[in-house]
Image (cartoon, rainbow, N blue to C red):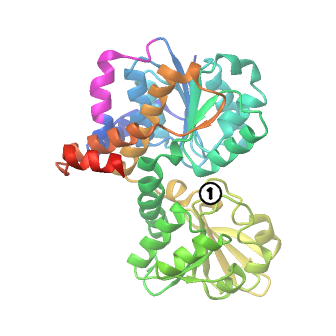
Amino acid sequence: MESMIRDIKLAPSGHDKINWVKNFMPVMVAVDKEFSVSKPFAGKKMVITLHLEAKTAYMAEIFHHAGAEVAITGSNPLSTQDDVAAALVEDGLHVFAWHDCTPEEYDTFINKALDIKPDFVIDDGGDLVHMLHTKRRELLSGIVGGSEETTTGVHRLRALANEGKLEFPMIAANDAYCKYLFDNRYGTGQSTWDGIMRTTNVVIAGKNVVIAGYGWCGKGGAMRARGLGANVIVTEVDPIKAIEAVFDGFRVMPMDEAAKIGDIFLTLTGDKDVIRKQHFEVMKNGAILANSGHFDVEINIPELESLSVSRRPVRKNIEEFKLKDGRKIYLLAEGRLVNLAAGDGHPAEIMDLSFGVQFFSALHLLHHGKEMAKGVHLMPEEINTKIAEIKLKASGIAIDALTPEQKAYLNMA
């Protein structure tokens, strides 16, 4: 099967990136060391659809070392790094991805990857599973199971399962403690502001930053904005999360009000039209819009364009929309994931935990998938604990252990 990438000559740079992140991913190094010997996935085929950058590449290589035949595609048109894709091809993986692919190319890549007839899948956002349940249904009977990386993807899976249409077990990797407590909060928080700052080169301190959504990603975005000196405003539709944001020390108000005073807007909800026409109409001149939700629908770009007399790039990953009254609004990274489209994504130490969840989820499916019911499953709690223990040990951190008397007391309680 011939891979589809931009340029194999870019591979040396990709290898350098992969080798760099290995220095900061002790969980995955330990996994690689153990399972490259035992090769539990020998004879199995796996399709991975994730943001194709160095951390993802290392995880894909580990599955390859563990015996799997791996085909990988990108989960977002702007997050694929062409040099990393080339490095994976040199290492013997099937790769179907390049940066800034068209929607048609994106679908073609997933289709081509599925041609290996996978036993297992790893998805990010739900497009891979969607294609399996629509255009590639002939492959469903051969799939043991899979896992999903994102909140958005888990929502799509649960909707499919609630309709009785999910045809194999899927582990919600996103809902594992070792994923969302760290990846969604600390990973999104840091990488989002890295993407915004390296793209705009503006100061964050003193600005009114509007965080749309106070889930785990929103918490991370708000926390890091405050650390940078911003005046943080949170918008929410969930009253419990709104109270949490208030108790965390943030101002909470509707987007209709926040739109009038915000300098930088960041959407992290997983829903559509979070910022739309009525909000663009009252925004300040120079307002900056960014999104860290999975899909590019949180900011209604067609409505912004309809209000504009011009749309033009003014800097890499920044588009200027000039409105009819002369105001200018700036959109980052086409409204796509700003931390990946305009940055390098989550830090390696964070993805070390997330991809540990993915590997052990796949291992659990390998051993138990055929017994599991169709639907969405949580990763067993003991796997979370194992991943955390590996991480602590690699970091040289020791913790206390319960005495037999303490264990007995808790068991009585």
Query: Disc 1 designates what residue?
Result: 336
Residue 404 location (% of width, % of height)? 20, 43
- For residue 320, above or below residue 186: below
Task: Please say whether residue 122 is visible from this viewpoint.
Answer: no
Task: Please say whether residue 223 is visible from this viewpoint.
Answer: yes
- Say whether residue 306 is left or right of residue 139: right
Report how many numbered discs are placed on residues in the image.
1
What residue sits 49% from the left and 38% below the top?
Answer: 379
* Residue 296, image quadrant: bottom right
Residue 81 location (% of width, % of height)? 49, 43
Q: In which quarter of the image is the N terminus?
A: top right
- Say whether residue 189 is left or right of residue 321: left
Q: Give the magenta part as a residue range.
A: 29-42
- Give the camera-side residue of 396 and 316: 396
Check disc 1 and give the amino acid type: Arg
- For residue 45, above or below residue 305: above
* Residue 164, image quadrant: top right
What residue sits 40% from the left and 46% below the top?
Answer: 351
Question: Of all residues shown, which one is farthest toward the top?
Answer: 43
Residue 110 location (% of width, % of height)? 65, 31
Q: Main secondary structure of the magenta part?
A: helix
- Give the camera-side residue of 353 and 266: 353
What residue sits 68% from the left and 43% below the top?
Answer: 158
